[in-house]
Image (tube, coloured by chain):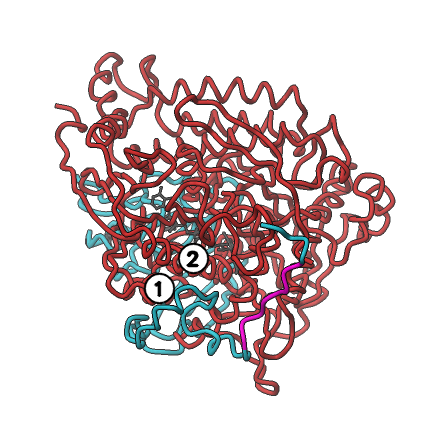
Chain colours: A cyan, B red
Amino acid sequence: MPTYVLTDKCKGCMECVKICPSDIMHIDPVQGRAYNIEPPMCWECYCCVKACPEAAIDIRGYAGFAPRGQSVVPTRTPDRGQWKIRVLNGDTKELVFPIRTTPWGSIRAPQEAPAPPAEALRSELLSFEPEYLAVDALPTLPRPASAGG
Amino acid sequence: MGESSSSATHIVDCDILIVGGGFAGCGAAYEARYWGRDLKIVIVEKAAIERSGAVAQGLSAINCYMGMRWNENQPEDFVRYVRNDLMGLSREDLVYDMARHVDSTVHMFEEWGLPIFTDPQTGRYVREGRWQIMIHGESYKPIVAEAARKAASEVYERIVVTHLLPDAQDPKRVAGAVGVNVRDGSFYVFRAKAVIVASAGASHIYRPRSAGEGAGRTWYPPWASGSAYGLLIQMGAEMTQMENRLVVTRFKDGYGPVGAWFLMLKAVATNAAGEHFESARLPELRTRVGAYADAKPMPTCLRNHLMLQEILEGKGPILLHTERVLDTPEKEAIGWEDFLNMTIGQAVTWASQGIEPTKVPSELILSEPYVMGSHAVCAGAWTSGPKDVALGEYSWGYNRMTTIQGLFGAGDTVGGSAHKFSSGSYTEGRLAAKAAVAFLTDHPGAPTVSETAIAQLRTTVYAPMDRYDAKKGNVTTGTVSPDYLFPDQGLHRLEKIMDEYAGGVSANYITNEHLLTRALEHLRRLRVDLGSMAAKDLHQLQRVWELDHRLWTAEAVVRHTLFRKETRWPGYYYRADYPRVDDENWHCFVNSVYEPASGEWKLFTRPYRALF
Ligand SMILES: Cc1cc2nc3c(=O)[nH]c(=O)nc-3n(C[C@H](O)[C@H](O)[C@H](O)COP(=O)(O)OP(=O)(O)OC[C@H]3O[C@@H](n4cnc5c(N)ncnc54)[C@H](O)[C@@H]3O)c2cc1C
Ligand code: SF4
Ligand code: SF4
């Protein structure tokens, strides 16, 4: 633990292996299914849980301080995240939040904008400034005369 | 045949190499492409950029936003705030520079599709606090990664960068980096004209409070391996504020954030008896830190200090009274979402312990220390500031360039520029990248990389696997061998040394000259043992090199803490032999340089200069 993989559900598709930021979801060569190779380096970040197409991964809270009996199950659609929480006394909560307001893949790459004039490279402005600052000009300070250098 | 001789070597030539595709790295890729249309821009990342770094789970707030368009704050206001919070010590030119640009980053995120809470009446972002705005940030990282993928020429994933490469002609000029692909075992040599290091701060330098299976429940993620510092120190880059490490107040065990609770929901903390303890402790605080005790808002470290004193007097646990403020279902939903978007483990903790936040208060605790540069602390590399505002010796080259030619930093990597958080780290990545493009324009030639240096590094990098293969037969089975240590064994030693000698939780953050000197002796022996590490597989090989970077970071922390003879940040750590703030002698930066040729460390001070 903290992540564990249900034998009957895992298809060995590697999605959890590809995403885990800690490099701890690996495929067991004998079973051909995923498992957590290093539980003490698991952040309970649920990245693998969210990525698994078979809903085969769950998390049992850290044995060190979390009594058994709860569950938190996230489900993502392109624009919403849904969370089902089962608390110790059996109550459940369901929470739904937006996760993105635009279609996935719709971000305009910086190179699609016209190339900036060469001399702009020496200014203090970043790409799309000052427009994206939504103020007239980039703030600066008068340099105190004593500053030197 | 050993791993070092059997695995393939790939050479990747590029103009700009970005080490780490977290927030700062993604910002760097985006901006580098805007200015450098024809450049080859490469990201190398040890995980997958859609879910890597400190924002892998998502976030529920953007902690740095000025709101200049609504005249909410100006960059000068932010500099005053940071000056205060860091007890008078930050590189104000860097802080100002980040602050004046950060709004354009946030507006870009919103346009890309990040849901930001907006007040329907005023059309303004909903403030969590003066600098923070609320977001539905479950997909914050994948959104930011989408833009970076489109901007970069190539993204190499599952490659852990182990070393930077110096120019063969000039050791003070960077020429690239090397690393191992932990999926196929091949060796990667990136030859670059400029390198931007954005490989984040460090957890697990100090022994965490959580034990056993739960050891991964640190507040900063377990994959924060101090690579930003480890890579730079070995190259001989000048470092600053490495003693300024972070301790955070969080919900106990799950380490759920408290910002929204204190700032937005206006929850209060008391001791176990229900007493408000902060004001009663102010007189004691004034004797330690003088006027800083009355700074508004109270500096983060001092709030920690007051809580710690209360706990040490046996008046804990400290309780955050969630039950007094959750008077509507909407507020309760905000409370849960705050965790579900960034510290899911806290929701698990509440659920598993049967804590109903509308009915009972929750315990708060102080975390183990972390080393980072983007939060209420600013450890990291000493970098050049922006030409138009940097003062005196704060500007010697290109913005955010370290003291190594062509080597830039951003996010946790850059020292002195605190309170960047996600938006500011991204912004600093943009600043570093634009400066790197200017550097390339002025220095179009490629540095030279020595073949022998690469061959040597290759042998070094794979040595733990070769050692395991050669020696494993000497013992029957299991993990105990007289010939080598495995990386988790070395990590536990490092955590114990730092915890007990350099002011970790078991020492109540207290240390002194004797303890720090002992720490250095222990770290030196650990460094020797690091020369005989074993790795059974590529995953363990990654852990060995992460441990190496953590050890470099730890050594810098100890040396800096030893050099600064005062207690500037009580609540982060205490020098028991110098318990007070000493503005007369120590209102300055402590900097260090490790000389790779001689193996010597130099420590010295640099002046603090107020921007206004
Ligand atoms: C629990 C938590 C809550 C937070 N809350 C907030 C908040 O509410 N609002 C806010 O604005 N900020 C918040 N932050 C802070 C914010 O996440 C950080 O300040 C920011 O991510 C730092 O950016 P960075 O690019 O320096 O590091 P990261 O984003 O961590 O990126 C570092 C990258 O480098 C990679 N890397 C590391 N080592 C190597 C190596 N050796 N080789 C190759 N790649 C490597 C990592 O995998 C990672 O992708 C929070 C952080 C945490 C942990
Ligand atoms: S993602 Fe799910 S199904 Fe695929 S390998 Fe992992 S656990 Fe198995
Ligand atoms: S919860 Fe996170 S750290 Fe743990 S195995 Fe899954 S992806 Fe990896």
Chain of the residue on which disc 2 is drawn: B
Residue B77 lies in the magenta-colored region: no
| Position of B556 relative to B109 (above/below) | above
Question: How far apart, in angstroms, are the residues tagged by discs 2 and 1?
Answer: 9 Å
- In the picture, the quarter occupied by the N terminus of chain B is top left
Mark 2: is the Cβ under 8 angstroms from ligand 1?
yes
Residue B468 numbered tag? none
Disc 2 residue type (three-letter): Gly
| Quadrant hosting residue B434 | bottom left
Q: Is residue B333 visible?
A: no
Mark 2 crowd level (few <14, some 14–19, many ≥20, 10 Å Cα): many
Give whichever of discs 2 and 1 has the lower sequence position.
1
* Residue B480 rendering spot, x and y as whole percentages: 34, 18
Q: Which residues are magenta?
A: A137-144
The answer as to whether the residues below labels 2 and 1 share one chain is yes
| Quadrant hosting residue B485 | top left
Residue designated by label 1: B30
Query: Which corner quadrant of the figure contains ligand 2?
Result: bottom left
Circles 2, 1 touching at the beta carbon (< 8 Å): yes
Element on which disc 1 rests: helix
Residue designated by label 2: B429
